[in-house]
Image (cartoon, grey):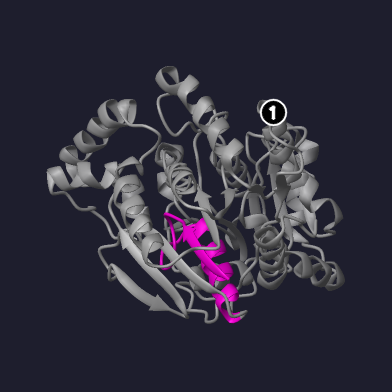
């Protein structure tokens, strides 16, 4: 089978989509399928290369990179040491850096459609058409986020005969908490475009049943049999780098959050306040709180805790995946901050369970998707944000959990791994590629 994968983020990018589809593409190649990938351009990799049997074409840029190029600016700090960002309270070079961010936020981001990858659409579509003319494709897979990838698929599907699978990592038109464009201007266009994509696609995949329900609610004309759930994937890295801190000190209580922060849907403010309260207890000398991943617009959340940075609170930023996994393995308790939407599942929760570690799950909503996912996991402590810092009984319960983390039943982990393994998830996609009949 010849498969064309249009996925903006791919190896060696450090993002959930890149992790997921790099693993799936390589598994497809292992099963003797031919996989060609079109992804975003990279300054550190060749425009064309073959990695583990997968043919990769990198092309184009995005609007945010273009603005930075106009100003000829680079990042002020090493992204692997973002604590310096917090101390300086800036993310890129001085006041000009702030000007660049402001220029993008108040100009291009207000008028560009559909998202930051709009410019990539043209070069990626040109590359896809050229590839398709030279060799026919059996299956086209387009991946979001960004949504621009699905517009490439829409154009290709109208030009060529192929089976098209739309893989949705994050919703587009009804994602109001973290909108990808100016919804005041483009709300109607967003809905109309996504409706057209869903109608033309042969199959649509999402990672949770809650997201599937939302799509059927917002798009009542969408055939129920067309949209299916393919679960989150856990694909451990082949090698593990050393930690930047020692893992041998058994006296330490390390709380580790691994994932992406957003001010609107995954805000670290409550967790930081809880941790500060923990430091006023007898556990103070043992405690450490580590953050791994992109901070986005959450830098200001750390401002009032600047004195704790690099002594009690460690901000590692975006690190190689091997390092992040090793950090989770060496955590005392893993911390999940639930989304502000009830239909999205943080991509890290599957990895958390696979680590076999106790999990502190801080929820914002009563019907939290993470809490539902952890329902059969014996090593979880669920607590509502509002109670974590306002309810003394809940505070003591969570403190006891952190101080005395429970042992984990490995049988449940083994059972879950069969559902979320690269092999299992790939087989679900293959069923859709062939005849549309998912195993799920």
Residue at image x 60%, y 55%?
A: 284
| Depicted 409 relative to depicted 100: above or below | below
Residue drawn at x 77%, y 35% is 367
Indicate whether residue 105 is drawn in magenta: no
Q: Position of residue 345 (x, y in %)?
A: 66, 46
Q: Looking at the picture, how far across and down is residue 357, in whole percent?
A: 72, 65
Write the residue at 54% across / 53% down.
259
Q: Give residue 23's quadrant in the image.
A: bottom right
In the picture provided, is 270 more to the left or to the right than 111?
Answer: right
Q: Is residue 183 visible?
A: yes
User: Measured from the top left, where is residue 34 in percent x and y?
Assistant: 52, 74
What is the quadrant of the C terminus in the image? bottom right
Query: The magenta stretch spans which residues?
Result: 1-30
Across and down, in percent, residue 134 comes to 37, 66
Which residue occupies the foreground of this view, 134 or 7?
A: 134
Task: Name the quarter where the N terminus is drawn.
Answer: bottom right
* Residue 82, picture quadrant: bottom left
- What residue do we see at 46% from left, 56% from top? 7
- Along the line of sight, which residue is nearer the eye, 235 or 427? 427
- Count of numbered tags: 1
Residue assigned mark 1: 221
Instruction: Indicate yes or no whether the magenta region holds residue 12.
Output: yes
Q: Is residue 420 above or below residue 160?
A: below
Q: Is residue 160 left or right of residue 69?
A: right
């Amino acid at each position: 089978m010849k498969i064309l994968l249009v996925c903006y983020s791919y190896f060696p990018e450090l993002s959930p989509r890149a992790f997921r589809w790099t693993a799936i593409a390589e598994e497809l190649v292992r099963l003797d399928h031919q996989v060609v990938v079109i992804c975003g351009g990279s300054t550190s990799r060749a425009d064309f290369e073959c990695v583990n049997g997968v043919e990769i074409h990198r092309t184009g840029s995005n609007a945010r990179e273009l603005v930075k190029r106009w100003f000829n600016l680079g990042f002020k700090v090493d992204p692997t040491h973002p604590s310096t960002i917090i101390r300086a309270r800036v993310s890129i070079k001085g006041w000009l850096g702030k000007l660049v961010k402001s220029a993008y936020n108040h100009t291009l981001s207000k008028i560009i459609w559909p998202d930051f990858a709009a410019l990539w659409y043209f070069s990626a579509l040109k590359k896809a058409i050229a590839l398709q003319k030279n060799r026919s494709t059996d299956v086209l897979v387009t991946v979001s986020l960004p949504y621009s990838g699905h517009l490439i698929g829409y154009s290709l599907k109208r030009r060529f005969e192929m089976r098209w699978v739309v893989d949705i990592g994050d919703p587009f038109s009804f994602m109001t908490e973290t909108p990808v464009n100016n919804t005041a201007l483009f709300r109607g266009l967003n809905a109309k475009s996504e409706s057209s994509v869903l109608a033309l696609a042969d199959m649509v995949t999402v990672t949770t049943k809650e997201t599937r329900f939302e799509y059927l609610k917002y798009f009542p004309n969408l055939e129920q049999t067309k949209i299916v759930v393919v679960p989150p994937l856990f694909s451990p890295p082949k090698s593990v780098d050393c930690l930047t801190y020692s893992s041998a000190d058994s006296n330490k209580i390390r709380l580790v959050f691994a994932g992406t922060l957003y001010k609107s849907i995954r805000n670290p403010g409550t967790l930081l306040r809880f941790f500060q309260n923990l430091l006023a207890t007898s556990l103070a000398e043992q405690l450490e709180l580590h953050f791994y991943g992109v901070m986005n617009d959450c830098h200001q959340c750390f401002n009032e805790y600047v004195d704790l940075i690099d002594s009690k609170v460690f901000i590692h930023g975006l690190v190689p995946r091997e390092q992040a996994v090793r950090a989770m393995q060496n955590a005392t308790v893993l911390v999940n901050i639930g989304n502000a939407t009830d239909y999205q599942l943080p991509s890290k929760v599957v990895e958390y369970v696979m680590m076999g570690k106790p999990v502190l799950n801080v929820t914002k909503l009563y019907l939290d998707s993470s809490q539902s996912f952890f329902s059969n996991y014996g090593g979880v402590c669920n607590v509502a944000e509002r109670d974590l810092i306002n309810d003394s009984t809940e505070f003591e319960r969570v403190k006891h959990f952190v101080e005395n983390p429970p042992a984990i039943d490995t049988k449940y982990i083994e059972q879950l791994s069969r559902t979320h393994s690269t092999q299992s998830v790939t087989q679900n996609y293959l069923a859709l590629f062939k005849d549309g009949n998912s195993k799920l």
